[in-house]
Each structure stands twice: as structure tokens, then as C-alpha cells.
Amino acid sequence: MSATPGHLARLDYAVLQQCMHCGMCLPTCPTYDATKLERHGPRGRISLMRALADGELQLTKAFGEEMYYCLGCLACMSACPAGVNYAEMFEAARADIEAAGLLDNPKRNFVRWFTVKFIFTRPRLLRLLGRCLYLYQALGLQTLFRKLRLTVLLPQSLRELEPLTPTVRRHFSDALIREVETPAQRRYRVGLLTGCVQDLIYSEINRDTADVLLAHDCEVYTPRLQHCCGSLHAHNGELELARRMARENIIAIEKSAGSLEALDAIITNAGGCGSHLKHYDHLLHDDPAFAGRAAAWSRKLKDVHEWLAEIGLRPPPMAVAPQRVTYHESCHLCHGQKISHAPREVLRAIGGLELVELPESNWCCGSAGIYNITQPEMAGKLLARKLRHLEGTQAPIVASANPGCSVQLEAGLRQARRPVRVVHPVSLLAEAFRRAHPKSARPPAASTRQPSPSA
């Protein structure tokens, strides 16, 4: 137990005072909606955090458990009329929890060390792990393991997680995208961020993103072997590791493009990552060597849908076969980055697609980073709610712009035996461009570029 919550106490007190306790956030909070308990809503959590900062409350295990019961979906920030910066308080509170060791136990400590501190700080090791999982799946061992019902031999916690196992791609992003790809006519220079998990399980989305950027006259710089963006670390109380990841990514982009100033934009296609990436300026504002560079980074960081809307979205020249599509909004794309209209415009630009609105499209699916791992019961309830709404649309395609959401939706649809395709909006756009040029695997802007050897 500790009476000195360092990170919360060091926050600008105005941040903690913003909440008017009006309650407008409560109907938007998934955990409050499920339990109707004040402590499970943003207003209750803010009251606890303010009491800690004021020294009126001590850090306890119960407080730690409450902060980790929060999804961090930021829906409360969209609803708040006072502009409360819940995200900043939330990350500070979790940092205090980890510093005080409130939730320490041998199993939790090992899992956090192995994942957050070890695997996700070493991209080569993460790729090695991904390659092993790819071989396990490609050789049919995973299918055999499931058919023989050997999952019953796993500990309960692993048995519950096994259905969430995503399919690892044969090629990672470096094998699909050259470090520099140039369109026939160049108007812009952009850096492309390929992510960590996305690089392993959705590398084709990164290739599709590069193709769409090339088709919009963007020269694309894609640094080799990129690091995790750091959102996993920041959202789990490891702010110093998050700062380290930020520095690594800034250096990687500078090395690839020559300088940040040489780029018109730095592009991300993952909603959750983008929300964190845009705040490198805040994360590194006390670092004299990186504060200015982080500020430039944050000014240039754009979600891919946001960037296409800014430079002028080009509709594909040919329509696709008529089909319905619905759109699930990533929490951190719509609530964190305030981007909701642009992805829909990408979908509407594709002739032949009929966009059917998804009820509660911006309600969390339960993925929330690693929430579906740490809080499987609540995550399962949220997923079931999302799947009911998806079924009501009768759409064979659901568009999702965040890898965590896509993994969660795919797992739920697979277990429900529903043949619904989960796909990124930009991938649908890239496919439409390719249909207009069937002799090329890519739009004409990228057709002359060849994949580089795998790193």
C-alpha cells in the first residue's frame, strides 16, 4: 500500500478538476452499462483518482482492479461536455498501480515481463515467435490439436484464450513492401507504419495501404523492422517503455526518409495504435533530445482514412460486384482520434458497395488492447452484443480498421459459424483498384515495384 501516487499527483491539477460529475458519460460506458455500479463508470473512477491525487485515499488492490476493469475505450471522452482528458488520468493511474506493485503475483509478473517487457520490445523476437506460430498453423498442427480436442489439456486460462489465436501470415510487411516505393507521378512523400501485431497477422493490409497511397500519388517510405508503437506499454502502466518505443520509431522514420521534415505525413492504418502515436509529443515533452522531434511527429501523424480525405479521395474507376458491407468503429479511432466520417467515405467511394449502418457501431467489441485476455468474461459479453448487431445487418462483410477489433470479431464469428468476412476499409479500396487493372496485382502506380526479400 502506498500513500503517494506519483504519476497522478504530478498531473496538472486542472486535468483532475475538469469533471463536473454530470453523468453524461455513464450511458456510453460499457462496464457501467453492464453493472450500473458507480465505481465501474468514468465518474466514479475519476473521483477515486482525484482522491488519490489529493492524498485522501491510499493506493489499494481494489483500486488497481478497478482501473484494470476499465476498457480504456474513451467513449466517455466523446460524451463529455467538459472535455475531460480521461485518457491521461487513466494512464497515470495504471502507472501508479504498477509502480506500487498492487496487483503483483508470480503468474501476472511473468506474463507481463514476457509480453510487455520482453517480446513487445524486441521486434526480431516477436517475428521469430510469429514464424513459429505460422509453421504450427501451416503444417496443420493447430487444426489437428483442435480436432483431437487436446485443448482440454491446457490450463483453463489458456483454454479460454486458444480460440482467439489469429492466423499468422506467411510474409511479413518487409517482404511485401520495399523501403521506398515511388508512384508514376509524385505529389507527396509519406512514411508508413506497419505495426507489430499487424505486421504478423495482417501484413496484407499494410501492402494494401501502400498500394492505395501509391494510387494517390504518394511516395511511400516504410522503415524495416519497426517497433511496437508503445500503446500496449502506456495502457498497462509502463510509461518509460512507451517512451523508449516512441524514440525507436522516430529514429526509424528519420533513418528511412532522411528526416521527419522530408515527409508530408506519417501514416498509420491501425485505429488503436494511431490514437497513441498522435501523442508522442506529450509522451516525450520532457526529453530534450526528442521533444522537438516528437512534436513534429505528432503534427504529421495521420490515420490513412484521414489522410485520403485531406488530399482528396479518388474513387476506383470500376464498380465491384454488388454487396452489402457494414462498419464497426474502432474505439480509439472514433473516440480517441475523432475519426468517424472518413472511413465511411472510403467505403462509399467504392461503386457496388452498399454501406449498411451497424447499430452501436462505436460501442466497444471487447478487444480493447488485451482486455479480452485479462477480462474474458466482460469481453465476451461485449462481443456477443456486437455479434447480435452484426447479424441484424445481414451484411456478408464487416469493415474494421483496427487489428485488435478484427481478431476479436473473427474469433467470435468463427465460433458462431457465421461466414462473415472481416476486412479493413483500405483493403476493400485496394481490391477495387485492382479489379480495374486485372493484369496487375496492384494499382498501376505500384505495378513496377517488386517485393524485397524477407527480412
Image: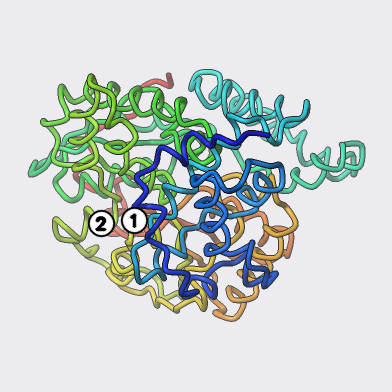
Residue occupying image coordinates x 50% and y 20% = 122
**Would residue 216 be found to the left or right of residue 279 on screen?**
left
- Per the image, the residue denoted by label 2 is 306
The type of residue carrying mark 2 is Glu
Say whether marks 1 and 2 touch (CB < 8 Å). Answer: yes
Callout 1 environment at 10 Å: few (<14), some (14 to 19), or many (20+)?
many
Label 2 residue SS: helix
Please state which of residues 445 and 258 is positioned toward the viewer in this rendering. 258
**Would residue 148 be found to the left or right of residue 417 on screen?**
right
Q: Is residue 303 above or below residue 244?
A: below
Quarter of the image for the N terminus: give it: top right
**Would residue 373 be found to the left or right of residue 152 on screen?**
left
Q: Is residue 411 above or below residue 108?
A: below
Q: Position of residue 379 (x, y in %)?
A: 67, 57
Q: Position of residue 385 (x, y in %)?
A: 65, 71
- Per the image, the residue denoted by label 1 is 337
Q: Which mark is residue 144?
A: none
Give the number of marks: 2
Q: Position of residue 18 (x, y in %)?
A: 37, 60
Please state which of residues 313 and 11 is positioned toward the viewer in this rendering. 11
Task: Give the CA distance from mark 1 to mark 2.
Answer: 10 Å
**Would residue 436 be found to the left or right of residue 218 on screen?**
right
Q: Position of residue 355 (x, y in %)?
A: 40, 76
Residue occupying image coordinates x 59% and y 53% = 367
The image quarter containing residue 247 is: top left
Q: Earlier in the sequence, mark 1 or mark 2?
A: 2
Residue occupying image coordinates x 54% and y 72% = 26
Label 1 residue SS: loop
